[in-house]
Amino acid sequence: MKPVSAQTLSKARILVVGDVMLDRYWYGAVERISPEAPVPVVKILREEERLGGSANVAFNVASLGAHAALLSVVGEDPASHSLERLILQTGIEPFLGRDPELTTTVKLRIIGRQQQLIRADFEALPKTEVLASQTRRFEELVASQQAVLFSDYGKGGLAHVEDMIRLASASKRPILVDPKGSDYSKYKHATVITPNRAELQDVVGAWSSEAQLASKAQALRHELKLQAVLVTRSEEGMSLFDDEGVLHVKAQTREVFDVTGAGDTVIATLACLLACGFTLREALPWANRAGGLVVGKFGTASLSFEELFA
């Protein structure tokens, strides 16, 4: 694999844009079943908060040693201030628009006996005018970046992604998109999109062979005028479809503890390396290794430079 130095990565600047959220974990002991309903009673012993959504993507960028700027929209509520505090602790440069009527997205996971028992989501869509102001901020920021990464979680934060991609294209920056939903036309002219297997099937339909997958992925690539489509395929590894054809890398065999946020780590690694001048084909083995390492950690996690490149 093509080597990369910490010094080179430290000069890379990546702008992450998308839906941020606060991941809350409540850890507890399960010793009995509730007399009120057939559910476990969890005695909470410890609480933890982590960056989620595009904030976790930016955290992965920063953890690898690159400079991460984060553009998003939050509410004016306690969760938003917790998010901002965590963001500042990681060294991410935040550009957060605030909407007093917005509920900052929170995902609460209750953990007992080393497994997730339930997840509760708190969320609301941001105002259009707040999002429009972020497009203006994006135009100010994009010229100083080496790569732009859009992390779409379908929470409304990327309502103007087409305008942002147009601006990034004009600046000739690599554009990476972690897509969401069944309409990918809004990602037209991006450099690469990184759907997982299920997400791609929602857009192009099921396939029954590798040849059929290649045909569907290449057709989507040409339709959207992309340089590449990267399909993450869990235990089957990753497949990159570009002008040269297909490049497949096998999954790195290891014990899978938790797949939460693995896609964030993969696309963050790709963005860092593209910002350093790597091609997608040169960056793919490192992104695959990053995904294989992070699934061995619990919850939304990241990797350090030493963990990935040692």
Image (cartoon, rainbow, N blue to C red):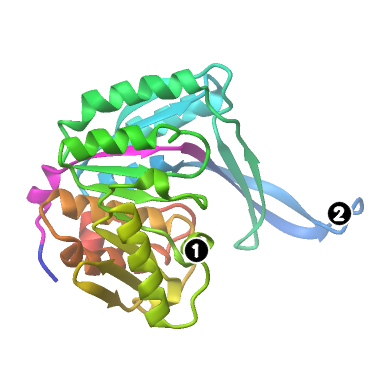
In magenta stretch: residue 16: yes
Image location (x, y in percent) of residue 79: 53, 29
- The relative height of residue 102 versus residue 237 in the rendered view (above or below) is above
Earlier in the chain: of badge 2 and badge 1, it is 2
> Which mark is drawn over residue 34?
2
Mark 2 or 1: in front is 1
Instruction: Say which amino acid is labelled 2.
Output: Ser
- The one nearer the camera, 299 or 121, is 121
Closer to the camera, 245 or 268?
A: 245
Q: Secondary structure at mark 2?
A: loop
Res. 145 in view: yes
Q: List x then y, in percent, for residue 145.
A: 17, 36
Q: Does residue 233 sit above or below 36 in this rendering? A: below
Residue 182 numbered mark, or none: none
* The residue stretch that appears in magenta: 4-22
Residue drawn at 50 percent across, 63 percent down: 258
Pinpoint residue 279: horizontal percent, then vertical percent.
Answer: 14, 60
Check residue 172 for magenta coloring: no
Residue in view at x 24 percent, y 74 percent: 245
The residue to which callout 1 is attached is 258
Residue ID at (36%, 58%): 194
Q: In the image, is residue 193 above or below residue 161?
A: below
Q: Quadrant of the N terminus?
A: bottom left
